[in-house]
Structure formats: structure tokens, C-alpha cells
Amino acid sequence: MRNVCSPRRLIGPLRFLFASGVLALLVGGCPQQPVDPESPDTADNSSLATASVLRFDANETIRFEGEISSTADIDVYRLGKLDRGDRVFADVKAIAARLDLVAAVFDVDENIHIFNDDRAADASDLNPLVDFVIRGRDGDYFLGVQALNGTTGTGRYQVEVRITHGVGVPDPRPQIVFLEWRGGSGLSVPNVGVFNLPPFDATQVGLNSSDTAALKQRVAAIVKDRYAGFNLLVQNSDDHATPGGPHSTIFFGSNSATAFAISEQIDSYNVDQSDNAIVFTGSFRDAFAASRPNFEELAQALGNTTAHEVGHLLGLVHTKNCNELMDTTCGNARILQPQVFGAAPLDDSVFGFGFQNPAELLTWILGLVGG
Ligand SMILES: [Zn+2]
């Protein structure tokens, strides 16, 4: 992902598209690509109802080519009936030079089960790769492919899909999130940067220094509340030692002209239990300098934002519903009030249709307390 997210919250590295060399090659006018009679891609396979059917070989594998004919084109392929515990591997690679793709898997209700933009979180390889085990209900599943929202490249791509039946559902894994209030030097958020931060102080977000201790406690309580019921343990550097085992660290400090926070990656199904994020405290002071929110409003803004970034580190993507924690569409003022996880439409920057059900995904990823 890159900085096509809303200015409110940004995930992933800043990256710019340089296409000058490629453009020079295209100026002479390319011949039309010959139509591939073997391709399952059709002109109107832009929804689950009109999805192209994939005919797998005896090894449950298929290789084919498709084409993104316009930046708005969506190609949907029916993977067929899959069961809980089946593994889906879908390797999607652009053939056309400037084509930047995303891939996602949906169930029959258009709920997203996995999303991938770039197979390398450092953006060194922009081709998507999906590789996961179905946790949802037995039934039809679909692979969606489209150009990354905001990019202009079109053209052909190749896909290899492999289904492996019955590998079994991995157990949910509890996660520790550590709120690092102490600052420090050489603090690394991979794909984002290395930071030297002073200890957190409430003046960084525009409150009084005397509010600092209470603000930290309130933010920790809000993050805990957002994940209540799931196996996510929120610890903080005021009350706990740095965890000895795998944990995600949230740093607080610095500022950004374009974001309230950035996470290291969208970590589908929380494969990496030690990924980090940073909340840019100075961005809150700057964004709310005129409106002067009160203590509780700023605590909500910091708590919502922290919980949102933790959501990315667990694999959640952006939605478009102002009340929902993974929303990326609403104005800055909205995060001053509580936001909660809930089923919501995917943001346009993620995919052209579909929904995210965080309660279901977080249950599969983290498990339920006492479950
Ligand atoms: Zn985000």
C-alpha cells in the first residue's frame, strides 16, 4: 500500500510511481494484444454473479492470462466450492509494464477474506500474492483482480491458482500490543522509517503537560475496549516491562503532513506477530489546532487511531463507514468520537465492491477470550 490512503490515516511506505522509461517505449504505439482464446477473462466478469469459472486441472491448478481493459475494470473468477481448511494460493503478475494490480478473495456474501496489494511490504515487488487457508464457511469463493485504485496502467496479467484441500485451519494466535510511551532513539518501523522520539507528553497533541499520565491511561483503556472479547493483550511501558516474546510495538511521537499514523504493513492473518506502527502525535496537535478538542476527545482520537493501526497489523483493510474503526473516508473531527469495529463496505482504495466483517476476521486471527 502507499500514500493513496486518506490524509487521515496512511499505512505503508511512501512511494512514487516513476514510469518515464516505460512511457517512452509506448509512445510509438503498440499493436493490439491478440485475444487469448484460452483466457477465462470475459468482458463482463466484474461481479460475483458474472464471475468467470476456472476449470482446474487434475492437480487443482490453473494458469491463465487476463486483461485489465480500463482502470475501472474488475475481473472476478469463481474458485469453486471450497471448505474450511482448504488452502488458496493465487500468484498474480502484471505482464503490461505499468499495470499495478491488487487481488482479493471473497465469499458468496462479498465478504473479503484476504487482500493483497504488493507481495513485498517494502514495495520492491508490486504484484499481489494470495496464500491463505479458508477459515470461513464451506461454499463458493471468488478471486477478484483489479488495478490499484488511483493508478493508470492497464493491460494483460497472468495468474496461477492452486487449491490444496484439507490442509486444516491454523489455530488463532493471541497477540500482545505494547504501547511504547518512553520514546527512544533508533526506533524502527520497517517500510516507514527510523525515529528518535522524546517521551510522550500531552503537549505533543495540544493538551497540558499535567494531562500526560491520565491521557496515556485513557488511550490504553480505549484500545483495550476496542478489542474487548478478542485475545489481544494491550500492555504499556508505564505499567509493564517490554514483553519478552513476540509483540507489536506502537510508538508515539513525531509528526506527518499527511497522516495521523502509519503501520508497517497490512499483515493478512497476522503472520508477523512483531510488526510495528507509529502514531504521529504532532499531527493531532496540527490538525486540531483551531478546534481545540478536550481531553476525552483527544483520548478518543489517539485510541481510535491506535486501534485502527493495530487492525492493519492484524490484516484488516480500509472501509467506508464513519462509525467504523477501519474507516478512511470521514473528516478529521470524526475520530474525536468513539469508533467501533463493525461490518462495513470496503473503501474504494481497497476494492470496487465487497465488505469487511472484522468480528469474524478477528475471531479467526486472534480467537475469543475464553474461547
Ligand atoms: Zn489505515
Image (tube, helix red, strand yellow):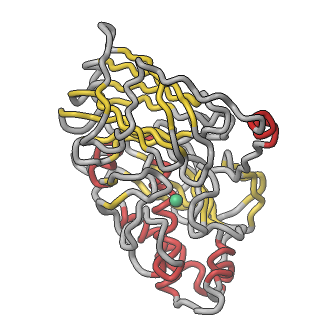
Depth check: give the residue in front, 180 or 4.
Answer: 4
Position of residue 285 in the picture relative to residue 295 (left or right): right
Q: Is residue 197 above or below residue 362?
A: below
User: Residue 225 lies in what quarter of the image?
Assistant: bottom left
Q: Residue at x 62, y 37 (%)?
A: 126
Q: Residue at x 47, y 29 (%)?
A: 66
Q: Position of residue 199 (x, y in %)?
A: 70, 69
Depth check: give the residue in front, 342 or 188.
Answer: 342
Q: Position of residue 324 (x, y in %)?
A: 37, 67
Q: Position of residue 273 (x, y in %)?
A: 50, 41
Q: Residue furthest top?
A: 58
Depth check: give the residue in front, 101 or 256.
Answer: 101
Q: Is residue 123 above or below residue 35?
A: below
The answer, for residue 243, to whether it is visible in the render is: no
User: Residue 51 lies in what quarter of the image?
Assistant: top left
Q: Residue at x 48, y 58 (%)?
A: 235
